[in-house]
């Protein structure tokens, strides 16, 4: 079975400060890891993914994420937060298996960026 | 490019009623999914399909049915609506197992 944990229900940060949204995962085999963002009353939008290669992945809107295999983590980061980054963020994982596996999502972390 | 289109956007059902949530994608994606989103619970997979004519259960399939007669369409059927099915439903699609999902804008369903 695969699972994702987002230990923080909410993260508060001031505009201009760096932000981190945490994610840890559990999966058999190599993981495919994803971050999605959801704005109010909207569907989820893809931010970035890790499949293989460099542990630091860059994505949309200045976000990046660092894959750490030893800590089974995939934290989302941004050097300087914007008020418009305020949204619900989801981490997701699927296993790199010979068969087909679907994405498992975390419970989400609400990011609130204050002016 | 429309992507993934879901209809309706909102619906109120009475207990015991039935309805179909429509989902259409125009990206020729093989894989399609239905998730439900409940506050503080993240997204739970209801059903998914790896191609026309092939569907499989996800984590929370009870009370739902699906069909996939074409590549484009993946409707979700609720036969006897229950209050526990009050949720926001998202349809998604993907080209393959490596790519991420493209989500629709969701259907907010209330069962009273």
Image (cartoon, rainbow, N blue to C red):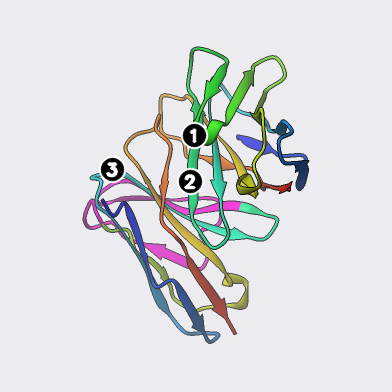
| Of labels 2 and 3, the one closer to you | 2
Q: Mark 3 lies on which chain?
A: B
Q: Is disc 1 in the same subunit as disc 2?
A: yes
Q: In this view, does A46 lie above or below B5?
A: above
Q: Is residue B69 on the magenta stretch? A: yes
Residue stretch in magenta: B43-72
Q: Mark 2 points at which residue?
A: A45
Which residue, given by chain and number where applicable, does mark 3 sit on? B30
| C-alpha separation, residue under disc 1 versus residue under disc 3 | 25 Å
Callout 3: SS: loop
* Residue A60, label in figure: 1
**Of callouts 1 and 2, which one flags the residue occurring earlier in the amino acid sequence?**
2
The quarter of the picture where the N terminus of chain A appears is top right
Q: Are circles 1 and 2 on residues that touch, CB within 8 Å?
A: yes
Residue A4: image x %, image y %?
Answer: 65, 37
In the foreground, B42 or A43: A43
- Give the letter of the chain under mark 2: A
Q: What element carries label 1?
A: helix
Quick check: do tags 1 and 3 share a chain? no
Residue B105: image location, x then y, percent: 44, 59
Give the residue at x 65% y 29%. Answer: A77
Magenta stretch contains residue A87: no
């Amino acid at each position: 079975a695969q699972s994702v944990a987002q230990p923080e229900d909410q993260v508060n940060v001031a505009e201009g400060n760096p932000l981190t949204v945490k994610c840890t995962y559990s999966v058999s085999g190599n993981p495919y890891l994803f971050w999605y963002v959801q704005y109010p009353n909207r569907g989820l939008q893809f931010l970035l993914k890790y499949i293989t290669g460099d542990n630091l992945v860059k994505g949309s809107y200045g976000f990046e994420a660092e894959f750490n295999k030893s800590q089974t983590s995939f934290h989302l980061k941004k050097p300087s937060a914007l008020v418009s980054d305020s949204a619900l963020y989801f981490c997701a994982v699927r296993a790199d298996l010979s068969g087909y596996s679907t994405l498992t999502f975390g419970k989400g972390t609400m990011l609130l960026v204050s002016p | 490019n429309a992507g993934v289109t879901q209809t309706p956007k909102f619906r109120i059902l009475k207990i015991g009623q039935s309805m179909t949530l429509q989902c259409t994608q125009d990206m020729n994606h093989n894989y399609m999914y239905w998730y439900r989103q409940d506050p503080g619970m993240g997204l739970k997979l209801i059903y998914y399909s790896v191609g026309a004519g092939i569907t499989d259960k996800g984590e929370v399939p009870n009370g739902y049915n699906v069909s996939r007669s074409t590549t484009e369409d993946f409707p979700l059927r609720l036969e006897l609506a229950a209050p526990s099915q009050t949720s926001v439903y998202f349809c998604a699609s993907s080209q393959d197992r490596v790519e991420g999902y493209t989500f629709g804008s969701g259907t907010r369903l209330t069962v009273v």
